[in-house]
Amino acid sequence: MAATDNVHPKFTEAMEKLSAMSEEERLSEKNKDLFEQAMNYAPLDIQPKLVAIRKKYDELH
């Protein structure tokens, strides 16, 4: 079983869109919903990384 077998399609969709953006775009207010989608569907092993990114976002806003 590959690690990607348990990845929710909504997480994959959000991460593909976010990965194509610059860091500034990812952390912008207009992409908050997309980031929230990634957070909500992230596999457990990825969630700590996303929490760190959310903290950075919160510091900017």
Image: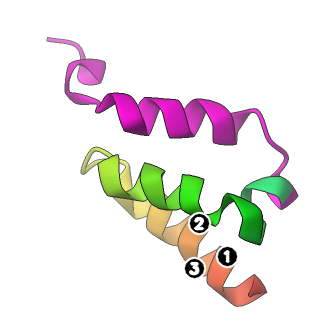
Gap in Å between the C-alphas at discs 1 and 3? 5 Å
Q: Position of residue 27 (x, y in %)?
A: 74, 65
Position of 47 with respect to 36 (left or right) is left
Q: Residue type at mark 1: give it.
A: Tyr
Any mark on residue 53, and which? Answer: 2
Mark 2 surroundings: few (<14), some (14-19) or many (≥20) residues within 10 A: some
**Chief secondary structure of the magenta portion:** helix
The residue most toward the left is: 1
Residue at horizontal 73 percent and vertical 55 percent from the top: 26
Q: CB atoms at circles 1 and 3 under 8 Å apart? A: yes
Instruction: Give, as a single range, the part of the protein colored magenta.
Output: 1-24
Q: Which residue is mark 1?
A: 57
| Quadrant where the C terminus is found in the figure | bottom right
Residue 22 within the segment the image draws in magenta: yes
Above or below for 41 versus 1: below
Q: Residue type at mark 2: give it.
A: Ile
Residue 18 within the segment the image draws in magenta: yes
Residue at horizontal 66 percent and vertical 42 percent from the top: 18
Q: Residue type at mark 3: give it.
A: Lys
Above or below for 16 versus 44: above
Q: Which residue is mark 3?
A: 55
Q: Secondary structure at mark 3?
A: helix
